[in-house]
Image (cartoon, grey):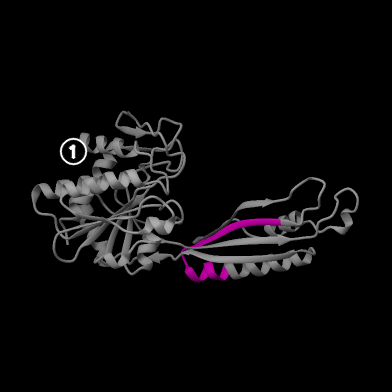
Amino acid sequence: MEKAVIDEFVELVSIDAESGNEAEIVSVVMGKLRDIGLDVEMDGAGSKLGSNAGNVIARAGEGDPIILCAHLDRVKPGKGIKPVIENGIIKSSGDTILAADDISGVVAILAGLREAKKHRSLPAVEVVFTVSEETRLSGSRHLDYSRLLSKMAYIFDASGPVGTVVTSSPTHVGFDVHVVGQAAHAAVNPQDGVSAIQAAAIVISKLPFGWVDDHTTTNVGVLSGGDATNIVCDNVRFKGEIRSLVASRASELANEFTGTIVCEAEARGAKAEVTTAMEYSGYTIDRNAPVARRIVEALRKIGITATFESTMGGSDGNIFNANGISSIVLGTGCQLVHSTREFIPVSELVASARLVESLLSVS
């Protein structure tokens, strides 16, 4: 299996598939799924996203299925990937990402399905390969859930080693702020101006950054404004986020931030408009839930102990859970993702494939 897994991984990461441009890789994996024996279709998410492909949905077997999921897109720079294999490690050549996030999950599912089919007919299973996951989980947001039967999903998309079981993810609230001041000539009559830059700087200084408590983080990550150094700037925009494993805490902080921003801006003679939006809802899966018990048993069968973790990141799991599908996210062993130093041990790719095969054999 090892050589086949390496070859397929290299094949798929070598296909350009940055978010919104997944048509080629969608076509390839649909063919692979059909060759394995699954019924395959593509939903209409692509047209809703303005991209060139939708999500891939495939199914096989009779009875109550489980979902195996991974995403097909990758972050930039993700074109012209040339993987390097050295001493059992597949890594980026250094000028692009590797796209192990999340081609490692795609390859694991494909290889695991093939291995399972060698021994018996495929059990009830649905495969979902999403597009545009890296852009606000857009593919799974626009997935046609009416086409899915399962209420239990395993998403191969965590960066921890195989055996990592993510059962908790945060609620993510974004905020967008527009600070309006008063323009004036910065050298002739600066006293007549109200600097939106200064007001925004003071406002931002009043907001906490990083860990607010042991389950909540906040950040301001985008700031823009100003036209020239001789103008007292009258318009500034900044954007940030709040993430918390406790949903009520995220909502509470969003309200607090809005009040602080408006009041602090007004105290400097400026005005602030604040827009907040729920990017995705968090979830916590009980370790005794069926979806968790099944993965523990599947891991045990291949000699790996489950390690339960929380994450402060979002994934398709957040959207699946919000749509009534009990979902957990599984480590595939990729490391330093979203960087040109990304790599994955071959042994982790093989272990992920074995895990898929094992998942299909337990109930």
What span is in magenta?
A: 236-253
Residue at horizontal 27%, vertical 67%?
Answer: 151
The answer to which quarter of the image holds residue 191 is bottom right
- Looking at the image, can residue 120 be seen? yes
Residue 48 or residue 2, whichever sits in front: 48
Seen in the picture, residue 334 relative to 172 is either above or below; the reply is above
Q: As shown in the figure, which amino acid type bears the numbered disc 1?
A: Met
216 left or right, relative to 268:
left
The answer to which quarter of the image holds residue 361 is bottom left
Residue at horizontal 66%, vertical 70%?
Answer: 259
Furthest-top residue in this view: 86
Give the residue number, with chain letter if any, for mark 1: 1
Q: Where is residue 154 in the image (x, y as percent from the top left)?
A: 29, 57
Quadrant containing the N terminus is top left
As helix, strand or loop, the secondary structure at mark 1 comes to loop
Q: Position of residue 40 (x, y in %)?
A: 22, 54
Furthest-left residue in this view: 120
- As for residue 241 lying within the magenta part, the answer is yes
- Looking at the image, can residue 212 be seen? no
67 left or right, relative to 247:
left
Quadrant containing the C terminus is bottom left
